[in-house]
Amino acid sequence: MAVNPSPGPAQGRARPRPIACAPPAPVSAAARIRDRRPRVLVLGDVLLDGWIRGSARRVARDGPVPVVEPSSVEVAPGGAGNAAVALAALGADVEIVCTVGDDPDGRTVRSALAEAGVRTDRCVLDPARATAAKRRIVAGDPPGQPVARYDVVPPGLPGSATIRALADQATAALADAPDAVLVADYGLGALSPAVRRRIARARTRIPLLVVDAHDLAPWAGLEPDAVTPSVEEAAAVLRVDLPEQDRLAWGLEHAEALRTATGAREVLLTLDVDGSVRLPGKDLGGTPARRPAGEHAPPSGACGAGDVFAAAWTAAVASGTSRDQALSLAQTAADVVVTLPGTAVCTAAALTCRLAAGDPGTVLSHRDLLTVLGEHRAAGHRIVFTNGCFDVLHRGHVAYLREAAELGDVLVVALNSDACVTRLKGPTRPVNPLEDRAGVIGALAAVDLVTSFDTDSPVELLDLVRPDVYCKGGDYTPEMLPETPVVERLGGEVRILGYLADHSTSAIVARAAEGAAR
């Protein structure tokens, strides 16, 4: 039952102080999940999400409704299943304990989970209940316009035999010492009090317990490490009306009440189009941090975004990423999925690509660079590559990079390492270290990605990158370049771009030295 909300600003409530943004997650955070492959156990309610898509050219005669002519049918695991698939897509080692009906939808869900790399040996079949399902009818090209949804909602709760089997399977899975446990409670009955008691017995052995539940109150006694409510779920657990004022301000005002009501060390409050905010307890520093949303999407495009957010945060923290950076990573993963049709997940490659786009001045490892370029190639983008010291950025560099960017869709700049610059230019160079050079180069609108190399020629890196276009500036000819045979063997082309006389780093350094000597 809702009670009267706390007094509004008109009654004198102090406005909250400005809140700091969480630091961006480094691009390497996505690779860290894949490398460390944390073992995550997912407990919860699985359902089948379906999307029936087609064109709608007419209105039915027997009612004022559009007639959709199906052209495609898509299915995907939903609920806890979506969280499990999201974890696997990021590189985690995932097991799920859930229940499905012994019916076609149940077999479809289990098959989809297994194909995604989720271990389903501990799924419990319930022949007495149908598998929960949500099917949308969508008119038009993706994302399209939903015109109807029909659900299968199993009546009542699972039988006593199914509940006992779920509790036993949860106990067995917890005995395998997972790195993290993610609870996805959609209120369909898989997470009975018996299952919660089994989790409580193992609680001291669970390094990270994250709860994503429609109703958080039953989980408070387990003292989760984190809960991930929406604002609506947060208002429900506090038994207050939905906030009419700024949702971020509401979350900050109710932070302590939310931690108390949920028993959680920290609350990760999702704010829909306003992003998310981390509300940690005093033992975790107590300093809130927010992360704005990078993408805005209609409600039909946000299906499963909350599952992906909870999964990404869990995988990141279980892999050693700081909690604030994990917030940024989770929000970024959610930003990816809201741009995709249907119930989608964010792959490790897509996450790496989005993180790299958020900070073009990052010096990407060759591994991360190739991951990002793989995503661009899959989208049909034309890759342009150039290299240089770019020590003291000047007008000639800017003009050259702008010209290079016009030759394709993605411009990669490979910087000579500091040791390489010293070998090529002398002991007084570089003037600026690699990280500084990358930060300046990456700030140019023309540049998309920055990496480095330690050899005197980028030939080995070119062999990995396989650019469509390799650019070089100055008074060279293609025949003069050792890179030309490599690029042409890989099917690319070499372009010599314009050169501005009297605009060189060496000339700038020399003039500065002359001025200092006067």
Image: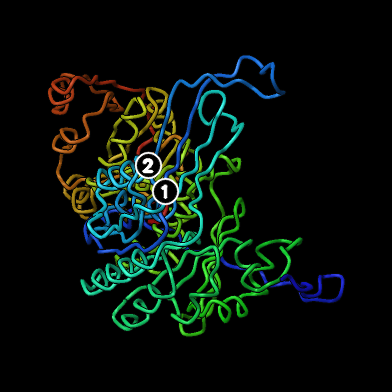
Measured in 3D between alpha carbons, the distance from the residue under mark 2 to the one under mark 1, in whole angstroms, is 8 Å
Q: Residue 105, which numbered label?
A: 2
Label 1 environment density (alpha carbons within 10 Å; few <14, some 14–19, many ≥20)? some
The tag earlier along the polypeptide, 2 or 1, is 2
Is residue 388 in view? Answer: yes
Picture quarter with the C terminus: bottom left
Q: Locate residue 321: give its quadrant.
A: bottom left
Q: Is residue 518 among what the camera can see?
A: no
In the displayed structure image, the side of residue 118 where residue 380 appears, left or right: right
Residue 23's spot in the image, x, y percent?
Answer: 47, 62
Look at the numbered disc 2 and give the secondary structure of its residue: helix
Name the residue type under label 2.
Asp
Verify CB contact (< 8 Å) between mark 2 and mark 1: yes
Q: Quadrant of residue 490?
A: top left
**Front residue (pair 350, 184):** 184
Dividing the image into 4 quarters, which one contains the N terminus?
Answer: bottom right
Which amino acid does the dot numbered 1 rest on? Ala
Residue found 35% across the figure and 57% down from its top: 99
> Within the image, what quadrant is residue 148 found in?
top right
Give residue 199's mark.
none
Q: Position of residue 71 (x, y in %)?
A: 45, 20
Q: Nearer the viewer, residue 364 or 21?
A: 21
Q: Secondary structure at mark 1?
A: loop
Q: Residue at x 50, y 61 (%)?
A: 187
Examine the rendered structure and indicate whether residue 367 appears above or below residue 11. Answer: above
In the rendering, at what x and y percent does residue 80 appear? 40, 56
Q: Residues within 10 Å of mark 2 (few under 14, many from 20)?
A: many
Residue 46 drawn at (x, y percent)? 40, 53
Give the total number of marks visible in the rendering. Answer: 2
- Location of mark 1 (residue): 130
Tell which of 388 and 377 is nearer to you.
377
